[in-house]
Amino acid sequence: MKHKRYEKIGEDLYFGQLRNGLNVNVVTKPGFRLSYAVFATNYGGAHRRFSLGGKMHATPAGVAHFLEHKMFDMPDGDNALSVLSANGAQPNAFTSSGMTAYFFDCTSGFEENLRMLLKFVSTPYFTQETVDKEQGIIGQEICMVEDNPGYVVYNRLMRMLYEFNPIRDQVAGSIESIAEITAETLYNCHKAFYAPSNMTLCVAGDCDPEEIFAIADELLPREKAEIPKADMGQPESEKPIRSYNEEQMEVSAPQYLIGAKVTPARDGDALLRQKIVAQLALRTVFGTSAKFYNRLYSEGVLNRDYDYEIDYTAGTATIMLGGESPDPQRVLSEINAELAEVFANGLDTELFEAAKRASFGSRLRGLEDFDSLCLSLADGVFGSYCALDAFEVLESVEKGECEDFLKAFMTPDRLAMSVISPVKA
Amino acid sequence: METVRKEILPGVWLTALENDKFKTGCLSISLLTQLDRETAAMNALIPYVLRRGSRNHTDMQALATELDGLYGSYIEPVVRKIGEIQCIGFLASFADDKYLPDGSGVFESIANLCGEILLAPCTKGGLLLPEYVDSEKDKLLDSIRSRLNDKRAWALHRLIEQMCCYEPFAVSRLGTEDTAENIYYQKLTKHYRSLIMTCPIEIFYCGSLGADTVAEKLSDAFSGMPRGEIDYDIGTDIRMNAVEESVREFNDELSVTQGKLVMGYRLGDCMEDPDIAALYVFNAVFGGCVTSKLFMNVREKLSLCYYASSLVDLHKGLMIVSSGVDFDKFGAAKDEICAQLDAIKRGEVTDDELLAAKKSVASDLRATLDSQYNLEGFYLANTIDGLDFDPEELAEAVECVELQAVVDIANSVVGDAVYYLRGNGEEDSDEA
């Protein structure tokens, strides 16, 4: 276990790798009642084809998410969700395209809850009967998201941007694909992806790091297993497959999401730096202090729910800007006009420096939220960097890097737009 | 954590929590006013119009630039409904001085900027700018209409609107579409001026500064506030019984693939002298957490719903059960939800169920102490309800709740209305 003090932001990080390959990060938070732990695997909805033991394996869409639902069943007939809750913890889990995470927070009994978390996530127990029953529950979940315009507008954008990467499909799979999942599929995928070497444990709270390392060492398998290598499909082209899609749903006004693919930096410091450069570039041009936002908000083209982000997951990176607008086409053309100006004249120096200061404050705020802090540490483990280094990196980012980023990834031919418009009477 | 409460100007109360474990500080300003159908939309519009520009920062970009310079601080409009009180104002968050490279005095700048936004709007001839009012009015209308986009929230809203149709509570926090459409800048300016004069104002601060320093800076920042006779005569009317003898049913049809079933109850006679701790525990036993009867039975055991949970509104004395259901399971789900409530009425709650519920509620309350925003909400609600305890004290009370108190509450609860969100032209076969 190593210790690093981040003086400027007043944080202490304890980190290290156990013999079985598990990476552990603990941020101590003196004075806080709440403790938070996430145990996550580098395995999500997009990890459908993978090589392991010299062989290629193909699995149906939705296994990672199905596993997440079934992991809570324990061999003694108990349900880990209930056991943790009965102990006063707030447990939950999610599956994204690139990660499955199990987590809890609590204000007492942290070590006992941590033991439970590590135990249930590392103990597979499935029967065909419970798998069959879960197919019904997940089937409902799959249908339900099709009523959610936020999901639909996102999914259709992914389908336009990505031709091969499974990120274009629903994480939960389809009614047909989950019908192929058996107890054996779940056991095999658990074995492949839930080995400590493919996982991380991240904790924040007023806790004893040594104890956490000791508990993880005691409870988890000893051997260091081979890490499966995912095949996300053929390399994607730089441009979208299609640039526009529109569908109708029961919504009050058009919902839009505009996106562009970014070629993600491989890993390590380069990846962290690219993330920060991307966020800063977007904030400078499309943030709430930028003239783009203020002008279009005043004109009624952008709305209260306008937002933008760059999302890194499952070997992809995607820029997204979206919200509600009476005129999504206008938003798209204004984005292009704004970018054309940046490409010609560069970023406004004053705005860039202000964005940098503001970004520091936002990141500082992020440290108060244990959930987002621990998940960003977990992302860092899977990307081979330390999320707390972001503050240092931010200070060193230069305007030219942000300009180069926008020029590389946000030219008009790289943008696609997904629209959900109200059902026509 | 020491809590200091004092009146810094007539009818302007500060609640200050000094604490240095956070890296950011939090400041909120809330004007309290009676929720009313005629004025709710105007009230909801005011903080958004004020946030468009002030005398010295005449547009949003000027304000945003100022806030960026203060290390990404924010001051955002907030509109809430707590019982039948509408709370409008601003919530600010800012980095604590000790983490800033060149930094001190961010709090003072934020306090002054809040004062400026609230008291010195950008005006022309003494009136709020028509272009800001019209633009924000359109956005308010968009927000009101966009409730439709989230079907779960929409179903909840539709139940309350119809179940409480004879009470101000039916009005949502943003007001109604028809009243929003009729807002003009002259009328809005007049209304704004009267709110500033008469509303009780609650200010909340949590951060590393001492209460005296905070009070002093805020007194300066708000010193120009014209105060008249403060309207303390505001409150929430709690209805104890159902509106009609039998439970009323309401339906909507939309083009959706999954149905929503929402059931509304009055908490009943137990609200005469509410035992807050026991009410929270009752809700956790019934449907408020993952060990609850609704979650364990209706969702997990019987798979009747994708989600099924309950919430209690202690300000208004309501309980709402919310669930996502296949159209052909409406009847079965409703019967099972009723059966679970009946079980509590008969005292069929195991020791484990009760203990888990108590732990869940107590843990939530203690976690409040670690979040400035949750603390802000906790103290504002407490002030409005005239309660005086901190989260730790309430958590301790929760741990002492006995089963009989939970059973008594279950027996006090009265079903008042049921709402179904159905698909277009769906026939549900097993309707009870």
Image (cartoon, helix red, strand yellow):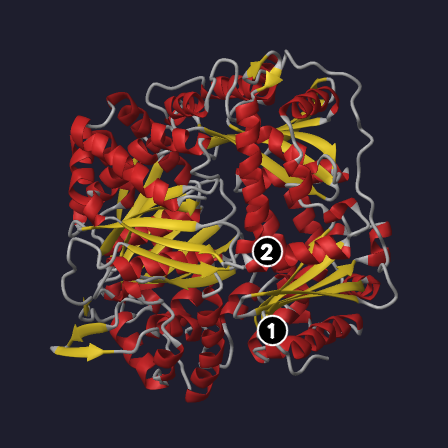
Residue on which disc 2 sits: B153
Residue density around tag 2, few if under 14, some if 14–19, many if 20 or more, within 10 Å: few
| Vertical relation: B172 (above or below) B399 | above
User: Residue visible at 24% across and 60% down?
Assistant: A162
Q: Quadrant of residue A45?
A: bottom left
| Vertical relation: A135 (above or below) B277 | below
- Of tags 1 and 2, which is closer to the observer? 1
Q: Estimate the spatial distance between the alpha carbons at disc 1 and disc 2, rounded to whole Å.
A: 22 Å
Is residue B303 visible to the viewer in this orientation of the structure? yes
Q: Quadrant of residue A289?
A: top left
Q: Earlier in the sequence, mark 1 or mark 2?
A: 2
* A121 and B411: which is toward the camera: B411
For badge 2, the amino acid type reads: Ala
Are the residues tagged 1 and 2 within 8 Å (C-beta)?
no
Q: Could you say whether the residue bearing mark 2 is in a helix, strand or loop?
A: helix
Left of B53 or right of it: where is B364?
right
Chain under callout 2: B
Q: Position of residue A284 (x, y in %)?
A: 30, 31
Residue on which disc 1 sits: B425
Q: Position of residue A410 (x, y in %)?
A: 22, 43
Q: How many marks overall?
A: 2
The single residue placed furthest to the left in the displayed view is: A54
Chain under callout 1: B
* B399 and B69: which is toward the camera: B69
User: Residue visible at 57% across and 54% down?
Assistant: B148
For badge 1, the amino acid type reads: Gly
Q: Position of residue A39 (x, y in %)?
A: 36, 61
